[in-house]
Image (tube, rainbow, N blue to C red):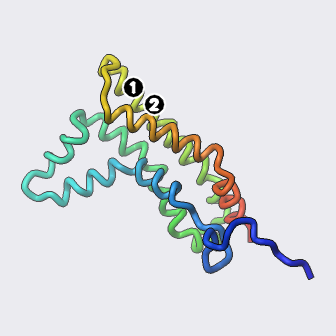
Amino acid sequence: MKQHRAILPLKHYDNEGRIKPSWPVFVSLLVLMRAFLVFIASISYRPDTGLLLSLFYPDRHYFYASMLVGVPALLVMFAVLWRHWLREHWRGGFLLVKPLVMLALLADLLLHVHMANHGHWAFSWLLAVTILADLLMLMYWLRSRTLRMMVQDWRKI
């Protein structure tokens, strides 16, 4: 009888024995979906729904572009949260998780570089922090061994 050896510590596995997504996965997805979160918060602010939206996104074009960037992250978030159902019905969907997030991170990075270019490269803490966060998250999605093992584990029967 072949014995199975745990590759990661037990805290990284769910009840079914599959590798759980780590916290950087959720953080990167939430950062990419920030336009949706700001939109939901602005709707819930009754006195002036456009005030909060205009505070974070003075130009509506950047808001719409950021919403477009967040769509792949939203799809991946649903895939991560409903991975048990997705594994039973559409196993090939897990092949799209990493490319979708990396595409969204690259699009977000390009959007912020375009915003910096549009502002004539004037320093902005918001742009600096978001570009740094995009680069760090992109590096995590490229180099994480745990993430690579998680996606491979989800594709197994």
Mark 1 closeness class: few <14, some 14–19, many ≥20 residues within 10 Å: some
Q: In which quarter of the image is residue 149?
A: bottom right
Q: In the rendered picture of this protein, how many numbered marks are placed on residues?
A: 2
The image quadrant of residue 153 is bottom right
Seen at 24% across and 33% down, the residue is 59
Circle 1 SS class? helix
Q: From the viewer's perspective, is residue 31 above or below residue 17?
A: above
Graded by Cα atoms within 10 Å as few (under 14), some (14 to 19) or many (20 or more), the crowding at tag 2 reads some
Task: Residue 114: give its label.
Answer: 1
Q: Residue farthest to the right?
A: 1
In the picture, residue 4 is in which quadrant?
bottom right
Residue at the spot 43% in from the left edge and 50% down from the top edge: 71
55 left or right of 150 in image? left
Does 44 sit above or below residue 110? Answer: below
Residue found at x 35% / y 19%? 121
Instruction: Residue 11: give x, y in percent of width and height.
Output: 61, 72
Tag 2 residue: 110
Image location of residue 2, percent across then percent down: 90, 78
What label does residue 123 carry, if any?
none
Residue shown at the point (44%, 55%) measured from the top left: 74
- Three-letter code for the amino acid on which mark 1 is drawn: His
Quadrant occupied by the C terminus: bottom right
Quadrant of the snapshot with the N terminus: bottom right
Residue 26 in the image, given as x and y percentages of width and height: 48, 58
Under circle 2, the secondary element is helix
Residue extending farthest top = 120
Question: What amino acid type is highlighted by mark number 2?
Answer: Leu
Q: Give yes or no for contact between labels 1 and 2 (Cβ–Cβ under 8 Å).
A: yes
Q: In this view, does 40 lie above or below 136?
A: below
Q: Is residue 143 left or right of residue 115?
A: right
